Image (cartoon, coloured by chain):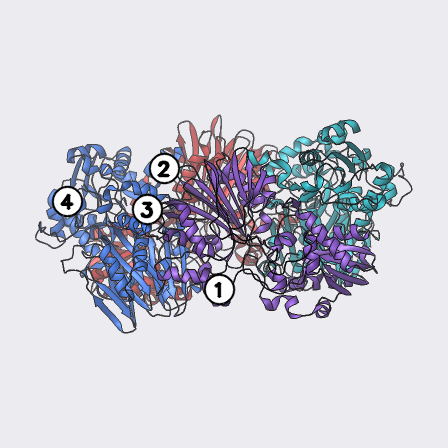
Chain colours: A cyan, B purple, C blue, D red
Amino acid sequence: MRQLKEECGVFGIFNNKDAAALTALGLHALQHRGQEGCGIVTFDNKNFYAERRLGLVGDNFTKGKILEKLPGGYAIGHNRYSTSGNNLIKNVQPFFANLHTGGIAIAHNGNLSNAIHLRKELVKEGSIFQTTSDTETIVQLIAKSKRSKIIDKIIEAIFKIQGGYALTIFTNKKLIGVRDPFGIRPLVIGKINNSYVLASETCAFDIIGAKFVREVDNGEVVVISENGIDSFKPFPKIKERPCIFEYIYFARPDSIIKNVSVYEYRKKLGASLAKESHIESDFIVPVPDSGVPAAIGYSEEVKKNIELGIIRNHYVGRTFIEPTQQIRSLGVKLKHSINKSLIKNKSLILIDDSLVRGTTSVKIIKMLYEFGAKEVHMRIASPPIKHPDYYGVDTPDKKELLASKLDLEGMRKFINATTLRFLSIEGLYKSMGYEKRNSSYPQFTDHCFTGEYPVEPVDANKKSFEKEGLSFLSSKL
Amino acid sequence: MRQLKEECGVFGIFNNKDAAALTALGLHALQHRGQEGCGIVTFDNKNFYAERRLGLVGDNFTKGKILEKLPGGYAIGHNRYSTSGNNLIKNVQPFFANLHTGGIAIAHNGNLSNAIHLRKELVKEGSIFQTTSDTETIVQLIAKSKRSKIIDKIIEAIFKIQGGYALTIFTNKKLIGVRDPFGIRPLVIGKINNSYVLASETCAFDIIGAKFVREVDNGEVVVISENGIDSFKPFPKIKERPCIFEYIYFARPDSIIKNVSVYEYRKKLGASLAKESHIESDFIVPVPDSGVPAAIGYSEEVKKNIELGIIRNHYVGRTFIEPTQQIRSLGVKLKHSINKSLIKNKSLILIDDSLVRGTTSVKIIKMLYEFGAKEVHMRIASPPIKHPDYYGVDTPDKKELLASKLDLEGMRKFINATTLRFLSIEGLYKSMGYEKRNSSYPQFTDHCFTGEYPVEPVDANKKSFEKEGLSFLSSKL
Amino acid sequence: MRQLKEECGVFGIFNNKDAAALTALGLHALQHRGQEGCGIVTFDNKNFYAERRLGLVGDNFTKGKILEKLPGGYAIGHNRYSTSGNNLIKNVQPFFANLHTGGIAIAHNGNLSNAIHLRKELVKEGSIFQTTSDTETIVQLIAKSKRSKIIDKIIEAIFKIQGGYALTIFTNKKLIGVRDPFGIRPLVIGKINNSYVLASETCAFDIIGAKFVREVDNGEVVVISENGIDSFKPFPKIKERPCIFEYIYFARPDSIIKNVSVYEYRKKLGASLAKESHIESDFIVPVPDSGVPAAIGYSEEVKKNIELGIIRNHYVGRTFIEPTQQIRSLGVKLKHSINKSLIKNKSLILIDDSLVRGTTSVKIIKMLYEFGAKEVHMRIASPPIKHPDYYGVDTPDKKELLASKLDLEGMRKFINATTLRFLSIEGLYKSMGYEKRNSSYPQFTDHCFTGEYPVEPVDANKKSFEKEGLSFLSSKL
Amino acid sequence: MRQLKEECGVFGIFNNKDAAALTALGLHALQHRGQEGCGIVTFDNKNFYAERRLGLVGDNFTKGKILEKLPGGYAIGHNRYSTSGNNLIKNVQPFFANLHTGGIAIAHNGNLSNAIHLRKELVKEGSIFQTTSDTETIVQLIAKSKRSKIIDKIIEAIFKIQGGYALTIFTNKKLIGVRDPFGIRPLVIGKINNSYVLASETCAFDIIGAKFVREVDNGEVVVISENGIDSFKPFPKIKERPCIFEYIYFARPDSIIKNVSVYEYRKKLGASLAKESHIESDFIVPVPDSGVPAAIGYSEEVKKNIELGIIRNHYVGRTFIEPTQQIRSLGVKLKHSINKSLIKNKSLILIDDSLVRGTTSVKIIKMLYEFGAKEVHMRIASPPIKHPDYYGVDTPDKKELLASKLDLEGMRKFINATTLRFLSIEGLYKSMGYEKRNSSYPQFTDHCFTGEYPVEPVDANKKSFEKEGLSFLSSKL
């Protein structure tokens, strides 16, 4: 069950006659990274064109009519994840601005940890912000840069920002990709015929038949122009430290990171979990669909059958909002149903990929007991989440994270499982192929489990801003 | 992959203060039976109220506002499956008519095989039809009946109609359920507190916490009133002969038919398939999600691992229509992607529940080879479909059914599989718990496999009507 | 100020390649007869096509896209007047039905005074009504007729109905016009090139450049086919008795009835009013726009200037509904404003064409005094309205008609005018060109002034139906 | 006939509990100044709230629901006139920005003649524009001002801008009104109870019962706060020179300028016209509704009757766009119809308030002849328009102004009138109450007649911008 939310997917393509259609397809493949809104900006060597929509790519960008409004051989696109607020279209990216040097379009995955600080300074100097997005801070910084070349303006801007970010930018007939110094957020380079492509994950290449070229390095700025790819590394060289949640949670199972499929990583997490904490039972039940790969790895490890004890309702529409109290009181049954003749009087191992607030687990376990389960052994294929994120993962407040409030036995009681086990940090790093976690400089950005943040979260105590800020999003200015 | 389409799900509830909300939930649980439109009619002891919408229940009937428009303790509801045509709201059920005896609302799952014939006669006598639905024929027959009691009017009407049908009717403070003489289409009775409920499948009971009471018998008319349930059996007694596709295809895995879950039936189909035609390979890959239960049964039978070799994209929206030629040429990749690092150089058994036109299999197998599969052994957990249906399953024309045109080797070549096997008719009946098919009076309506139709399809050669008829649906009158 | 409402305008055209576009224009010219909805049905020698919309013709039927959906050389159209209810699209005409003899489309201006009575009988025999419109009663009667020729079916139907009606019907490649025995509702025949045209008023001919041919006689059925016009007069011959409100109220000023423009009739009403009841004052102020022609006639008669003392706001949109209490309390000022520097300390004659409830006059006179008027002498260019109509004019209930409750002095006090005078019945008939009213058989249907109804209003006491009936219109069935 | 277009109406109210509702009413009264869009921004002592809509005030701001979204006792509002472009909502005012000093909302009537010049400079310095509106230039200038007090920031900004402008601004709990140095665009101060009100015309006071206090002087900045009104006059003192078109064309007839109603001015223009160029004829026909006040003045002067020879169709909806070629070829008949029995064989004087392109006159005169008019003597109650405007009147290009291309006889031939006369410049000034035009410093901004512009139109030759600029408005960025 998805309880953490990724902030966005990005895509860009250089010099291809089907730029907009291929971008729509790439965004469709990245849809799991954000479902609230999507947008595409194209350039036809003369004008920029933009279409932004609330909702899914497949509902908005698949008709010939809209693609005709997006002519040109250059495009960048963006998927936005879901937040509250009713008038959000203006926060849908890519953003566009007419600079002195010409038009610039920008799409951003990640989160700046000092955006509020920078924004206040910019406003003081007369910049007018139109959105509450931290991405606009980047655009305003570029606009204010006194450097003459656009690439220098961008580098001046990224020297000021902090946090996790992967950017695709189109300006001055250049497609530019940027990844933050730690490489927290992902960005990969592909090629289709002679056209270079940028995307958050490789699954966006497969859908259009593009070939994977390489990952953008941490702290790298790649500039794709008619002369090919130029690479700039303006930051001091440090080792990469990518967000561990891409592996265990966000990326699509068929995406490939460092030559291994995400599906394989997750099966290994399940296998390690089995090694650490298997218990006898009648069969294994995955929480659909998030727990399935780990359950398969677990099942193979212990030679115990998987059964579909929980059926997911595929028709829980995106607009299944504002239910009545009657419906609300029925809770998770809208999304899941129990295969009751299977479950009855059985002891089962319930597997999910993570545990955030615990609310979904509470409901599912309650349903399993209602339909006759005898024992429910909950197994989580990642460590307890105790700390919030500030670099692009939409975690709840610390006080809503179950593992930050309760110890293991407390959590077990809360979700009412017969037993509860998490994967250990050691198991996590081993599953990823490391002997152990490098405690002086961890191989991954893993602060949600460990509390060790790679970058000081400057804005973290400025929570008051969020309320202020959100006022932009609605009609309340 | 869904290529056959069920015609509709029905629901009814008697005397419950949350009638409309519970009906919405029941329809949500039956959503897999029809996604085009949905409607609810309620009665508050004085007036009838109706709301009908295109699209999903969860997108239309979950807001308090709409439920407020549906007051009263009595309700029936309907899910409609998807057809073409742009102005279909008037074909969304339940239908309502003001008869001399008072209002009547009716919801219908199934298809009449002599509706056109009857309609022509009614029009000749001055009946004005407002829709092209065969359901309206039933309403017009009831309206024209000279019998004085409403139950007699209904019985007079069902004596004239032929085909497969399960009806929920509300009129004169009675909730009436009707099932055709063969019991081709399903209808079950449940109870929540003191309120009787009717539904196409038991999964609609689980979502609201209703208890299963019994199935409506084939040829039975049940009349639920304040005095409880009355049962009428106006037809000569024959054995039931339910549609086999409910077991292998339509019903939700967690629905229960004759005390066994549909999931179990499908696992048994997979196990039988394994017994009949297993072949050595590296692992088993189900076509998601239709092939999963059979793949689990197959896997358990042969002790071979399942792998998620094909990933389904959950964001292929309902409105993913009218793609451009570019997008169209990319075909099934919109819906599925291949877990390529897993598949590469592997020999695999690909399992699906049925094969209709073969077009989806062609695309999936092509993708598997593109991403490096060495061998693809296709296994289908049901027999070849050679004959169209006329009783509520929306099969393509005979000439589009792959198995009616090609022999096994022809089909194998067409889909380009290394090997191809179907479950045998014998295996099918055995999986259902019978020793063998009773050839003189088969236990199931199975003409799609065998060509043995339970009822003469009277209208079958009147295909010209469809074009005429469809003119009603659009603005072309 | 419009307080009475006409029920609808009709149009029909035979064999013209621009049938739908010309019908749209004709309906636009007849827009004053109904603004709620409009519809056009066409026939292309093979199929019927229908488009019906809520709102104005000009907002709905002027785009090429919609006209492309209405191919064919034959068309009828309808304007519907505004009522309450939220789901009215199904009551928008023309109505269409597929009869045994083929499709029939019908558009109706008027009101049947025995529709409820007939409807009940039809329902008893099994007819299913889809609307609450009396027009559907006509369609159902035609459908049930056992006569073999369509013209005989229509004549059989109109022998059963009573009231005021003007119909345009298209069926079997014939355009048929019908006017009730008294000719209460208007219908005229025109010709454009070789195509005959039917319309409620001649202004619909002017807009498309058609020439006026003649009026349809009272009680006449005209059948336009490829052989030209046939005329049937199935009823006993009686003198016509058209509705007087067409002259003084409904028809557009530039329409011509009996060779005289409606504008001229209204100027004469104003002149007669001046002769009967002129009083000294500073100038004449018409209530815009309804009182202008009478004011011009009055002004010419007494050689006194007209001034625009009241300015009408042209932007009071059709959707100016559901105002807040604050706005509601400001009342008529939304629609009118006072030319205050003109009015101040002046004595003025305020002229309107009729007085129904008196509410608008109350508001206008109050505003005039607020802005400084010294004396307001109200003059109404028609007699007091004391009786409701049942033949197509949407009058309020008798108890809301000011003149049915109060005598002249009572009305004067109610509206707070300095003096108040109405045109006399004698003045009315003289203005129309008659020496006097023929009391044994009045030249006009004038029961609203006199109480003498031409036809017994059978349904008048069945008001309960209306509530019942209206339930059809909304989602409350 | 409206062929020139005003750019907008503005409104503001300080400290009134019904601020939003009263602003909606004020904008409704000012609707003639702009029908494309409308917006209201309110402040509730804590937050700003904004609602902007395409279309009429009466269609958008009269429902309780929307007013509930606009809480607070302070409001400004704006009506926008109609232009082309499909995605214009972002150009609908009032504009809002979050400055360092707090939120600021601004509504602007007029046009800056150096906006492009200023905009280019601002962009060069890093300002990002979101719209193509010259109003945003004002906002950006205020944002960039280094002055510390908001009033000083505003004064610094208006020192840079040139052209005609009337602004209502709300910021820092102050309602600020600004009028350009010449007072080209109008702005008046009213009071309702204890709340000050600003509006473009006095008619906005009448609708809400506010009393007129005084006009804002040319070049004056009024600051309304809890301490009452403060006045600043930052510019060198010059005589006012208001736009003459407000008197003869834009302002509502019941608005009062310098103690005289606009209706009176227009009657005097008609009377002067009669004195200058009367000719014998049967009667006077005004072009509705623009020519009516002048026709009344003319009629009184020459004692000749007015007749409604041309009937205006009130149902030409706002969305009467995109007609088919058939309908387009029928031209002006959609808007007007001829009272043909009146016109036939008559000689008539046709009066309108102005002549711009001449296209409407061509159509009307053609129709009059078609319906039998013998002679049509066209009389225009203002001088020939030979020069375009740059200060807020949307005139066509010079080459489309009929009087800039043809002499009097040429124009007469073009519109095919029997005779044609315009009011002289002398007659114009006399009608306004002046002995004669002060040629060294004209009493009015009258360059459209005379070519004497009060301010150099800096941007006039930068027409290329408009195309560039408009790219913002559509999806083409």
- Find disc 1 in the rendering and name its residue: B459
Quarter of the image that includes the C terminus of chain B: bottom left
Closer to us: D67 or C158? C158
Q: Residues within 10 Å of mark 3 (few under 14, many from 20)?
A: many
Q: In this rendering, which labeled residue sits more in front, label 3 or label 1? A: 1
Host chain of mark 2? D
Q: CA distance from mark 3 to mark 2?
A: 26 Å
Residue that sits furthest to the bottom in the current view: C227
Q: In this rendering, which labeled residue sits more in front, label 2 or label 4? A: 4
- Find disc 2 in the rendering and name its residue: D207
Q: Mark 4 and 1 residues: CB-CB less than 8 Å, in contact?
A: no
The local secondary structure at tag 3 comes to loop
The numbered mark, 3 or 2, whose residue comes first in the sequence reads 2
Closer to us: C373 or B389? B389
- Find disc 3 in the rendering and name its residue: D432
Q: CA distance from mark 4 to mark 1?
A: 61 Å
Q: Mark 2 and 1 residues: CB-CB less than 8 Å, in contact?
A: no
Host chain of mark 1? B
Q: Is residue B219 left or right of residue A34?
A: left
Host chain of mark 4? C
Q: Mark 4 and 3 residues: CB-CB less than 8 Å, in contact?
A: no
What amino acid does circle 1 point to? Answer: Asp
Q: In this rendering, which labeled residue sits more in front, label 4 or label 3? A: 4
Measured along the vertical axis of the image, is residue A194 above or below residue D449?
A: below
The local secondary structure at tag 4 comes to helix
Q: CA distance from mark 4 to mark 3?
A: 53 Å
Location of residue D187 by image quarter:
top left
Closer to us: B331 or C126? C126
Q: Which mark is residue C450?
A: 4
Q: Mark 2 and 4 residues: CB-CB less than 8 Å, in contact?
A: no
Q: Residues within 10 Å of mark 1 (few under 14, many from 20)?
A: some
